[in-house]
Image (spheres, grey):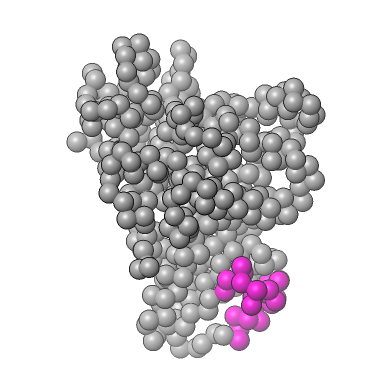
Amino acid sequence: MEAIVRQDYLDRIEKYLGKGMIVVLVGQRRVGKSYLLKLLRDKKQSDGQNNVIYIDKEKRQFDFLRTYQDLNAYLEAHWVEGKHNYILIDEVQDIEAFERSVRSYRTEPDTDVVITGSNARILSNELSTLIGGRYKEIYIQSLGYKEFLLFHQLEDGDEALAKFLQFGGLPGLVRIGLEEEEAREYQADIYHTVLLKDVIMRNRIRNVAFLENLVCFLADNMGKLISANSIARFMKSQGETVTSAMVIHYLSFLCEAYIVSRVNRYDIHGKRLFENNDKYYFEDQGVRNAIAGGNREGDIEKVLEGVVYQELVRLGYRVYVGQLQAGEVDFVCIKADGGRVYVQVAYLIADEATRKREFGALHGIKDNYPKFVISMTPLVSRSDDNGVIHLHLRRFLKEGLAME
């Protein structure tokens, strides 16, 4: 099969090379970080002026690299004076105190360091402590809809969209195929690998049964406002006693492993963040569906919210849940330059009551930032309702939030 290049990510990596910065690719396991690193390796190796030192900690041939001293010795042995040295390390968090080594080599002339990892806390905390702002973190997500079409060689249409909503965007599905049984088995294997390596083992989890129940709870309640107290009360009703503090810790472990993302509430009028009652969305919709089980008839609105959330992040927004005095807006999306949009997500706008509920929440926001309703309403591609743009989901996933 011909290699498929996720050029946008490669371009973002190249942007920070040659600037004395460590480039850190982060994200859940199996979303494509390793593949991107291999593409970068192959590109740099094609130039005879470069020396590429490539380490894949998921391969047993690199098991001997356990500490930063081991890493230093290996890098020194493979270093080539007079060439541009590229140090590429996959799943670097499996090397104890790795940050000491990469900090040292970052300062070498004609040297670039690119590393990948599947744990936000270990990467960000350790690197920020030792090298401050001298690293750039690039978040790698599972495939978006346009990439999904390309990877699986599908034509855009309702059937392709249904497959995307059902199976999600793990790149490895291109080898497995989109048959229900095989795809679900693969997704379950990935989920259990991530849970074991990046949550249970790394954080020395003792109550594994509660952790698994917590993930199932998040899958069932994706897109709902929840708190540690509400989860603790629910678990107690199921015969399992846990503290709110324990819930908070386990939620943070799941976020650090990029299994789920926490989305805070944002007071639209007061322009401040609330400190409790957040929403949680899964990194990959297919993995979430595999955990939740069944088909999507009963939870299609949750699925749509999750897909729209991930696409908004892909578009470069920081995403929050919008809080109004009279209700809620699904997403407040803010860019680094201060630009803002509001997004409401619905399955179908099938009657006037639904229209008033979905559009009314946005009409009630008295500012001039763009406002959108995204739905799967048939025959709607793009329309305007008193300044609120109605977009079909497929158009949004292909074109984003273009104002024209």
Residue positioned 49% across, 29% down in the render: 299
Residue 22 is at least partly visible in this image: no
Is residue 369 placed above or below 34 in the rendered structure? Answer: above
> As drawn, is 251 to the left or to the right of 300?
right
The magenta stretch spans residue 16? no
Left or right placement of residue 370 versus residue 61 in this view: left
Q: Residue at x 57, y 74 (%)?
A: 55
User: Which quadrant holds residue 237?
Assistant: top right
Residue 46 lies, in percent from the top left, at: 38, 81
Region rendered in magenta = 55-77
Residue closest to the eye, 240 or 313: 240
For the image, the number of numbered tags is 0
On screen, residue 366 above or below 196: above
User: Looking at this rendering, what residue extends furthest in the left direction?
Assistant: 404
Expressed as whole percent of the image width and height from the top left, the position of residue 404 reads 19, 36
Q: Residue at x 59, y 80 (%)?
A: 75
Quadrant assignment, res 301: top left
Q: Position of residue 197 (x, y in %)?
A: 67, 56
Of 280 and 187, nearer the camera is 187
User: In the image, what residue occupies the spot 42% across and 30% down?
Assistant: 332
Percent across and percent down for residue 56 are 57, 71
Is residue 73 in the magenta section? Answer: yes
Q: Is residue 2 visible?
A: yes
Quadrant in which the N terminus is drawn:
bottom left
